Image: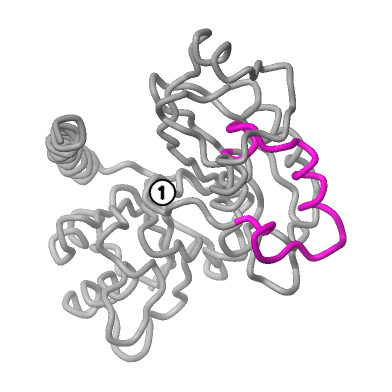
């Protein structure tokens, strides 16, 4: 059978990550179940199978990519017929017989959607912090890890400046639980979309939790932590305990794209199903957010 690659989108919140695990529900486990029901393979895993990355529990994907030896009739829609509503294949491509979805990626891109209303001039005056200053932040900010307050708003310039110090080739041993292979070359940027700052990071590969810990450090500096904290984290010395950088929450993170140089064909029917599913999720969560806001504001 020819080797074929599939783009897969999913809502990661109900799953214990992408990679198969015993006795818990994962995205990969659901994919394997669907392929078995379609009689595509028997045994431990499909021939030639690999995936672009192992997203953590709660992390979503727009373009997770799997590859396997698959019959030509296996279209995204055929696969979707056996998948749960929150997982959809939406494009496919023919691949070389030795193609490996993990090792052959040129780069991967993640996006983190950080709810971060922009700081108003009034908030800047009240806090005594401007975009050009780099103070240590208040005692409350330091003790809470520097998480930016939604009430005060976020300084976009500080966020962009913090991320800029983390780009390029760096040893990120203090921003991952991995003990080896921690040097990575990151590119990316920060952009504003209404009340969200979108942090985009791109690299050939990522250490475990690297994206979420980078975001967490950027959030701390945007809230007022010293820029020098970044230098300490990037230094040779181990930074542990209260001085360490915890990962930001998983929910706002999405695996946005993976580049292989393959010619992916978007299947119209399958892509429409993805759009419908995620638009319904958006409306449902808007209603839930409104309920939460009502209770928070009225008690």
Residue plotted at (79% across, 65% down):
238
| Mark 1 secondary-structure assignment | strand
Q: Disc 1 designates what residue?
A: 63
Residue 11 covered by magenta stretch: no
Residue 52, given in percent of the width and then of the height, sits at 50, 61
Q: Is residue 239 left or right of residue 284?
A: right
Residue 66, given in percent of the width and then of the height, sits at 42, 63
Q: Residue furthest top?
A: 121
189 is higher (above) or lower (below) than 73: above
229 is higher (above) or lower (below) than 127: below
Q: Nearer the viewer, residue 103 or 58?
A: 58
**Whether residue 1 can be seen here:** yes
The residue segment tinted magenta is 219-245
Q: Nearer the viewer, residue 98 or 54?
A: 54
Colouring style = one colour
274 is higher (above) or lower (below) than 88: above
Callout 1: few (<14), some (14-19), or many (20+) C-alpha neighbours within 10 Å? many
């Amino acid at each position: 059978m020819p080797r074929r690659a599939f783009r897969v989108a999913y809502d990661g919140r109900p799953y214990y990550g992408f990679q198969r695990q015993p006795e818990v529900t994962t995205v990969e486990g659901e994919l394997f179940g669907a392929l078995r029901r379609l009689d595509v393979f028997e045994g431990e895993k499909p021939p030639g199978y690999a995936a672009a990355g192992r997203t953590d529990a709660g992390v979503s994907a727009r373009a997770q990519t799997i590859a396997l030896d698959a019959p030509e009739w296996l279209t995204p829609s055929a696969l979707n017929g056996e998948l749960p509503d929150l997982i959809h294949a939406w494009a496919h491509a023919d691949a070389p017989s030795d193609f490996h979805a993990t090792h052959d990626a040129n780069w991967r891109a993640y996006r983190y959607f950080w709810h971060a209303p922009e700081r108003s001039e009034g908030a800047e005056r009240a806090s005594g912090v401007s975009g050009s200053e780099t103070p240590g932040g208040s005692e409350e900010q330091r003790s809470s890890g520097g998480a930016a307050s939604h009430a005060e708003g976020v300084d976009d310039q500080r966020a962009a400046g913090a991320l800029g110090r983390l780009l390029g080739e760096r040893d990120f041993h203090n921003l991952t639980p991995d003990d080896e292979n921690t040097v990575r070359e990151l590119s990316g940027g920060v952009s504003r979309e209404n009340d969200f700052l979108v942090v985009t990071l791109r690299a050939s590969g990522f250490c475990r939790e690297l994206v979420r810990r980078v975001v967490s450090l950027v959030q701390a500096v945007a809230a007022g932590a010293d820029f020098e904290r970044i230098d300490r984290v990037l230094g040779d010395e181990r930074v542990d305990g209260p001085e360490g950088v915890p990962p930001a929450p998983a929910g706002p993170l999405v695996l946005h794209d993976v580049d292989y140089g393959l010619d992916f064909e978007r299947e119209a029917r399958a892509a429409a199903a993805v759009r419908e599913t995620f638009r319904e999720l958006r409306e449902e969560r808007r209603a839930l957010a409104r309920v939460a806001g009502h209770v928070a504001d009225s008690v």
